[in-house]
Image (spheres, grey):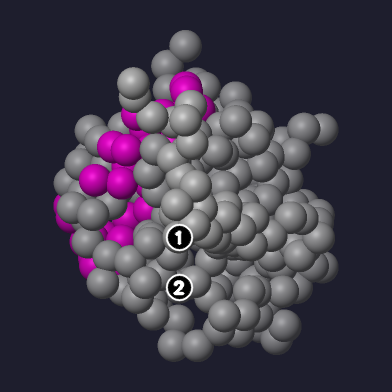
Amino acid sequence: MTNHEKLIQVFQLGPQRIAMLTAYDTITARLAVAGGVQALLVGDSLGTTVQGKTSTHEVSLDQMVYHTEMVFRHSQGLPVIADLPKGTYDSADLAILNSQSLLEAGAWAVKFEGNPPGIASALNQAGIDFMGHLGYLPQSAQRFKVHGRDAAEAEELILQAKDLEAQGAFALVLECVPNDLAQRIQDSLSIPVIGIGAGAKTQGQILVIYDLLRLSPLEHLPRFVPQRYADGGKILTSIIQAWVSEVHQGSYPHEEETYG
């Protein structure tokens, strides 16, 4: 079975909902795979989560290639989708060229934001699998907001979603839209909608892995990040604190941790 066939098999409408997480390196890929996700997204969100910047705008293609290689190395046969970062799909030729670089790094498919003219059709004609992304678009947004509350904007999102499907998208990420609109969009498509801050009626869900594990550098996590699970940041900090305490006391390393 080819990667394309496996991709379509994973991303289909059905009783099994799709769980995705972002991954940026071998550790996050291994954690996500061990946790049972069905696919991995190498997100340009690494700009904020890994690089500590205030946006994704400065993430380069070379950086995406680098992180895609690391994630693919430990993806254990799961689909790997990689973001085309800002400025890398300003034309059809550029989108194809840069997508091929990500595919060579191990991505099975690419994702881009919005529906810029000619990009989806060009990727489709080039035989490159792609995922759409509508709603809140981090690469171009000036501020955070929920999209589609206005009736005209909601109808436009539905039209854009249908157009991306018609042009060959195998799935669609829908970010920060009202629950009822997300359901309308999912019901209007024959491809899965992967929601993030889009309610519970989509075929799948995706989160930034650092947000889910509470390792995010954000001071205030988005509303859609669950707070009911263990706080990974506190757990890991307590391990480090325990080790630092032993070092200060002179009790580390223990006998079993030394070489005779």
The magenta stretch spans residue 162: no
Q: What stretch of residues is rendered in magenta?
A: 66-95
Quadrant assignment for the C terminus: top left
Cβ atoms under marks 1 and 2 closer than 8 Å: no
Q: Is residue 54 left or right of residue 160?
A: left
Sequence order check: which comes first, mark 1 or mark 2?
2
Is residue 105 at all visible to an observer of this figure? yes
Image mark for residue 57: none
Label 1 neighbour load within 10 Å: few <14, some 14-19, many 20+: few
Q: Residue furthest top?
A: 1
Q: Residue at x 64, y 35 (%)?
A: 35
Q: Residue 93's spot in the image, x, y percent?
A: 17, 52
Type of the residue with mark 1 = His
Q: Residue at x 44, y 88 (%)?
A: 142
Q: Secondary structure at mark 2?
A: loop
Type of the residue with mark 2 = Pro
Q: Is residue 194 left or right of residue 68?
A: right
**Residue 113, quarter of the rendered image:** bottom left
Image mark for residue 138: 2
Q: Residue 106's spot in the image, x, y percent?
A: 31, 32
Q: Residue at x 39, y 80 (%)?
A: 54
**In front here: 252 or 6?**
252
**Residue 59, quarter of the rendered image:** bottom left
Q: Residue 21's spot in the image, x, y percent?
A: 57, 47
Cα–Cα gap, marks 1 and 2? 44 Å
Q: Is residue 105 above or below residue 157?
A: above
State which mark lies toward you, 1 or 2: 1
Q: Residue at x 72, y 36 (%)?
A: 13
Q: Which residue is mark 1?
A: 248
Q: Secondary structure at mark 1?
A: helix
**Residue 185, quarter of the rendered image:** bottom right
